[in-house]
């Protein structure tokens, strides 16, 4: 059983590396992140800050919970996940940076739970393509965890929608500051 877990982790690590490469490469042909919609402005530090100025989102975001997202500027799936969060009523502030790893380390994210973007919402870390309703549930329940994560980039998760509607099963993992993990929800 132990070797089965290790091989699953090894497969997960390889899939994560492939997915992150695809994510970072996919956005290279894209225009500047979010700026084309008028929903973002660049800060002096080169960060992009998204606002709720998109039609139909102002009212929802004005009353929404503030979320700060850290991502690379070329990641298209990260932008799609931010759109999902805004549509769900979160007031999202986006910081584009060349390397998100220091943010992950600063907030104690276990390396095997990494994905392409990291968010902070009401003191919790949200890593990867976590659905908005699961974040709302966490905020309502207030579990004694550091955060929740969707490791890798599962097809069909928010921001990772694929043509044909394929949805791979995945777990949302809760993690504590001391490295303990448990399944918070399965999709």
Image: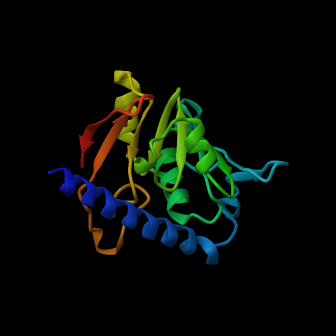
Q: Residue furthest right?
A: 44
**Residue 2 vertical position relative to residue 181 in the rendered view, above or below:** below
Whole-percent x and y of residue 67? 56, 37
Q: How is the image coloured?
A: rainbow
Residue 95 in view, yes or no: yes
Looking at the rendering, which quadrant does residue 154 occupy?
Answer: bottom left
Q: Residue furthest front?
A: 3
Residue at image location 40% in from the left, 34% down from the top: 179
Whole-percent x and y of residue 66? 57, 33
Give the side of residue 80 with respect to residue 161, left or right. Answer: right
Whole-percent x and y of residue 15? 37, 66
Looking at the rendering, which quadrant does residue 68 occupy?
Answer: top right
Residue at image location 68% in from the left, 58% down from the top: 98
Whole-percent x and y of residue 174? 35, 35
Looking at the rendering, which quadrant does residue 142 occupy?
Answer: top left
Residue 59 in view, yes or no: no
Of residues 131 and 183, which is closer to you in this image? 183
**Residue 54 vertical position relative to residue 138 in the rendered view, above or below:** below
Residue at image location 41% in from the left, 27% down from the top: 139
Residue at image location 70% in from the left, 60% down from the top: 35
């Amino acid at each position: 059983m132990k070797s089965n877990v290790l091989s699953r982790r090894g497969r997960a690590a390889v899939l994560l590396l492939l997915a992150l490469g695809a994510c970072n490469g996919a956005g290279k042909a894209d225009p500047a992140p979010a700026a084309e919609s008028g929903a973002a402005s660049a800060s002096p530090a080169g960060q992009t800050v998204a606002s709720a100025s998109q039609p139909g989102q102002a009212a929802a975001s004005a009353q929404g919970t503030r979320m700060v997202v850290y991502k690379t500027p070329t990641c298209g799936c990260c932008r799609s996940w931010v759109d999902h969060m805004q549509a769900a009523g979160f007031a999202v502030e986006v910081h584009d940076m060349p390397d998100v790893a220091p943010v992950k380390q600063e907030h104690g994210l276990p390396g095997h739970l990494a994905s392409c973007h990291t968010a902070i919402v009401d003191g919790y870390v949200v890593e990867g393509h976590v659905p908005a309703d699961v974040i709302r549930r966490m905020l309502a329940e207030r579990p004694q965890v550091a955060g929740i994560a969707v490791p890798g980039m599962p097809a069909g998760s928010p921001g990772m929608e694929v043509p044909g509607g394929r949805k791979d099963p995945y777990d949302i993992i809760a993690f504590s500051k001391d490295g303990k993990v448990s399944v918070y929800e399965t999709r």
